[in-house]
Image (spheres, rainbow, N blue to C red):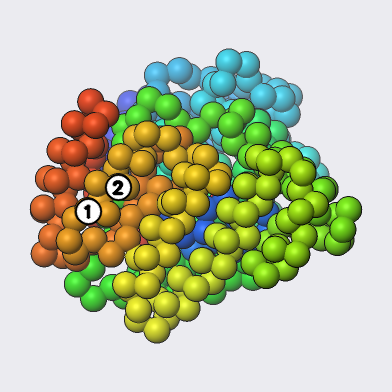
Amino acid sequence: MNIEQLKAAYEAAYQKQATDIFFSPGRVNLIGEHTDYNGGFVFPCALSFGTYILLSKNEESKINFRSLNIDAVYSLELSELTAPLPNKAWANYPLGVFAQFIKRGIAITQGYDIMFWGNVPAGAGLSSSAAMEVVTAYALNELLGTGYDLTELAKIGRAAEHEFAGVMCGIMDQFASAHGRADHAIYLNCDTLNYELVPVKLDGVKVVVANTHSPHHLDSGSFNDRVRQCQLAVEQINTVRPIKCLAELSQAEFLQVEHAITDEVAHRRARHVVGEVQRTKDAVEALQKGDIDLFGKLMNQSHESLRDDYEVTGPQLDALASAAWKVDGVLGSRMTGGGFGGCTVSLVRDEVIPTFIEKVGLEYTNQTGLTADFYIAEIGDGAHRVL
Ligand code: GLA
């Protein structure tokens, strides 16, 4: 859909024109997985696809939520904006953002007619929910004149995810959606929230995203289990050395304290986090030096660690990654995002992209009975006004 079509769809739904339109992107993480809620580094980039919000004021003192992607329509009184809707309603993502503004002391005294449309494939681990949260926060910030900066909008989105979707995620997805920059990845320290925009200049190489279309996507239960296992590791390490988060430890320091983690699962989770933080630092350094081969190798190691120690890959992501590793001209391939389904991200030389899609697609179908989808990622800008 283009903007004209979106405006027409809004008019058809609400019999009036949208006064404001905003956009916020999905993201693909190049490396640094399950490190964000452990105070570590991540290296995501915003995609050129994401979520649009169209809105205008109404006279009914209600917030009306519609989406062109999902049929269910929600209409809430201004007094009903602080509690989640039952049954995993999609509107909990924007509603959770309204609730965060109210929690910060911002009164919502005006009704709005809202329509969303997104082109991030849902359940693909490319942060369609973060895009919806951030675009709502961005729109409210503009319309209410609250003056929050992009980092605060990302925090509002994360809090909405915690409180209204029940996923105890880190800051990566919302931060990337808010702060993205075309042709750059964001090297973010999730402890301090200091970040650097690093140009992704890949001569003759493209970032290819492959969607498993696997029915198992990350549920809040498995994700929150990982968060708890990391917290347990931190608690047990604290019996021998005070730390706030796992990312504080270098790999050498981890070797000195790992005996304190008596829980075998928590031990492996912590080993992944500490190794992944180091790999992310090394990968960014490699990219800055133009050593894409090393970057690719670190991506492969990241996948192995997520498979063996963190156990968030599953047969579909493993099938896609290992099929990619066999293709000449693939520099690296790994799962991206939360895991258990969703997408892989690969660095592929231009001339082998058609072979890559054919071979990996075929092997994936042979192994899983499913059909994968491939997109060449365009790295786009973060949240912004469209109209
Ligand atoms: C999900 C979460 C992020 C991050 C990733 C794993 O996308 O929302 O905060 O933890 O998983 O890196």
Depicted 252 relative to depicted 212: above or below = below
Quadrant of the image occupied by residue 66: top left
Residue 76 seen by the camera? yes
At label 2, which amino acid type do we have?
Ser
- Residue shown at the point (18%, 31%) measured from the top left: 366
Q: Nearer the viewer, residue 32 or 53?
A: 32
Local crowd size for mark 2, using a 10 Å CA cut-off: few (<14), some (14–19), many (≥20): some
Q: Nearer the viewer, residue 302 or 61?
A: 302
Residue at which label 1 appears: 326
Dots 2, 1 in contact, CB < 8 A: yes
- State how far apart marks 2 and 1 are (Cα): 7 Å
Q: Nearer the viewer, residue 258 or 189?
A: 258
Determine whether the residue tagged by mark 1 lies in a helix, strand or loop: loop
Residue at which label 2 appears: 322
Measured from the top left, where is residue 131 in percent x and y? 48, 45
Depicted 316 relative to depicted 254: above or below = above
- Residue shown at the point (85%, 54%) measured from the top left: 238
Measured from the top left, where is residue 298 in percent x and y? 42, 64
At label 1, which amino acid type do we have?
Lys
- Residue shown at the point (25%, 51%) measured from the top left: 324
Q: Residue furthest front?
A: 259
Local crowd size for mark 1, using a 10 Å CA cut-off: few (<14), some (14–19), many (≥20): few
